[in-house]
Amino acid sequence: MKTPDWEKILPKFQLPGRYSGGEYSAYPNRENTIKFLLAFPDDYSIGMSSLGFHTVGNIVNLQPGFSCERVFAPAIDMEEWLRKENYPLFSLESKRPAGSFDIIGFSMQYELSFTNFINMLELSKIEPRREDRQDCPLIMGGGPSFANPAALSAFFDIIILGEAEPVLPEVLSLYQKEKNDRNSFLLNAAAIEGVFVPGISKTARYAIFKEFDNTYFPVSPPQALTESAHARINLEINRGCRNRCRFCQASVIYSPYREKTVEKLMEVASASVASTGYDEISLTSLSGTDHTEIIRLLDELHYSFRSLGVSAVMSSMRPSHFASGLAARMARMRKGGITLAPETPSKKLQKVIGKNISSEEIISAAVEAARLGWKRIKLYFMIGLPGEDAEDIESIISFISLVKKSSGLTVSASISPLVPQPHTPFQWVSAQDPDQLLQKAEYIRKKAPAKVSRFNKGQHIIVSILSRADASLSELLLAARKRGARFDQWSEHFNFEIWEEAFRDIGSSWEEYYFREYKTSEVLPWDNVVLEVGRESLLKAYQKAMEA
Amino acid sequence: MTLRVRIKYSKRYPATLIGHLDTMGVFQRGMRMAGWPLEFTRGFNPRIKLSSGPPLSLGVSSNAEYLDVALRRRMSAYRSGLLKEKLIEGLEVVDISEIEKDDPGINTIISGFDYQVIGEVLEKNPPFSKCSLREKDGEIFVRVMKVDGNIANPSKVSGLKGCSYKKIKTLFVD
Ligand code: SF4
């Protein structure tokens, strides 16, 4: 295999900067170390703005005796070139073939990247199925997709369940000791809390990082040079959420709620500004405005960084905070519009989902936002909720009109269908007919005085199926990949016909999986993942929702 | 007090793989990291006051690129030198010099570029009028001049096929 003249070849590809490496704070190249390839199964621009991805890279690089490199799903033109030249997928830093690394660790964050993951193994000339492999790098996985590891288990040697910070260092030390005996390593790793070894583990606990407040933080992760849109510091201010909306998986898998102190955050922010040169700090969290000291934090960020031309931004907030002076602080940032998620204005459905932001609260928040100078507001709604009827859909339309009339703001709305997710009280419910969902969304789009964004029906179907997948669906993923599925998250690449055929290939149909309703007496495919929030409390919440 | 500084820099692989705007982004971040006393535009989204010469095409290296930036005050040699360490692989500061308040901006004083042709020339056609070819010691050079405020890309006007370019010189008015 001849090493290509990258300097000559790379400029021929679109956005070649995504293969070049050599960015700010690119990972150091250390000799005589165990080589860990951190892989993200989607485009460079997405992976590089993922905090979880950088967190893992940082852990590996801090581990004595290890060095980390990166690889992303190659764009279509690069993939074609790799296949034509029969050249293997290579790392950014040293441009070494992926298959020559000791460990490849995939960051699995959403269902529509699964086919890219399989494609990346193929391009690395590694058999996707674990049982077909021999003498290959250790294929490791981590990330929120493993809240349900059932369909992915067939492809991974070892899975880190939950938050990587408390688990990965121990796994890496063990690997270092036992790198010459894979079986013994896997057996011993299975005993570590937060590790699931397919074929060995029966159940495993989902790991939670207890020292969240005091954690080290990827202050200076490698920074993307292309796609400047994402060029900013992601400051994680809290983890988890104090609310428990019944459709929400994130609040369950990141439970309990934890937050960093303002002092720690200011320390991290200063270090990040100094080491990145970014001019924007984005406060990332599930529900940022719930941080107990959010006002003090915003004030300190504002006064410390204003003279450096650095501003802090926060995208979404809860309406109740408008009363508390928070809005005035946010008005100071005035970047983009304001985002609120009422989900549903129907009192009945609010009881079903257990999220009770009253319509009055939202309206007065919108009025306050307009007074402070905002021009636009974005509202998130959810359809397809259990017990929903025509009146509930009408209520979304009249609510949008009311917000618009009383505040004078330009309203845009996003309508997304419920995806019943593992480890939520809705894990047992059947998903609504996708055609009906689409009709409802179209109806709202026509009637509401707002710009309403659509959802993609096919993508919704596949996400819903894969999120509650059982082990049989690993075959589906292989079949879809074989028929050419990749970059499914990108509507321009997503092709539902491929998936329909893939279902036929495995002797089934999408309907069979999509409309599946689970009984509360059944064992669920993801019951082997043990969370802080137990099944009992989910069941109670489910029953409450069904009574509402 | 506003002060203007002109940076001359070179660009080589792998920095040649990032486009013009991204390159400007790297300089802005580099200057921030180096703690330069930058001057910002007013308003909600303060921006660094920066202007540059014409964009360089992807994949093309250069030993003479320029950009102007406004500062609030004069800085120490140490601080200005710090920028060198805050750039990425392939971007190198060649020179930093102060310019007068009313000096014309970099974009108005550039009049053209000299490129060296690298690689095998597959086909030689007469070049378009905006450019001239010159051969010396077996090497081919292309000169592209500014017309109506624009400087064309050498691959578009040189009449050479199958080769790539390396910028070797920036030409100035007078
Ligand atoms: S939907 Fe938002 S507010 Fe509700 S539980 Fe999830 S993160 Fe919290």
Image (cartoon, coloured by chain):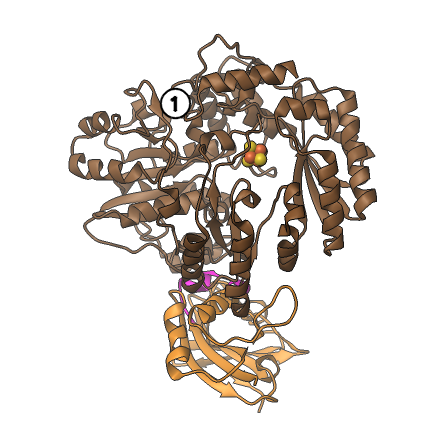
Chain colours: A brown, B orange
Q: Is residue A110 visible?
A: yes
As for residue B40 lying within the magenta part, the answer is no
A167 in relation to A303, above or below: above
Question: Residue sitting at 46 percent across and 27 percent down?
Answer: A482
Q: Specify whether A192 is left or right of A408.
A: left
Query: SS class of the residue under badge 1?
Result: strand
**Image quadrant of residue B100?**
bottom right
Residue toward you, A214 or B145: A214
Q: How far across and down, in percent of the image, does residue A483 sit?
A: 50, 27
Check the image and report above or below for A164 versus A348.
Answer: below
Residue A64 in the image: state x and y as whole percent.
22, 48
Say which residue appears at 54% left-offset and 64% top-offset. A303
User: From which residue to which does the magenta span run?
Assistant: B11-22
- Residue at 42% of width from left, 72% of height from top? B34
User: With A68 as the anchor, is A289 left or right in this view?
Assistant: right
Q: Position of residue A266 (x, y in %)?
A: 45, 57
Q: Disc 1 beta carbon < 8 A from ligand 1?
A: no
Residue A518, position as x, y percentages in the image: 53, 12
Which image quarter is the C terminus of chain A in? top right
Give the mark count.
1
Q: Which quadrant of the view contains residue B172? A: bottom right
Q: Is residue A430 visible?
A: no
Write down which quadrant ligand 1 falls in: top right
Q: Residue furthest top?
A: A521
Question: What's the residue type where badge 1 is placed?
Answer: Val
Is residue B13 in the magenta section?
yes
Q: Residue furthest bottom?
A: B174
Q: Nearer the viewer, residue A123 or B35?
A: B35
Q: Give the residue at x 53% y 88%.
A: B99
- The residue to which callout 1 is attached is A530
Label 1: chain letter: A
Categorize mark 1 by other alpha carbons within 10 Å: few (<14), some (14-19), many (20+). Answer: some
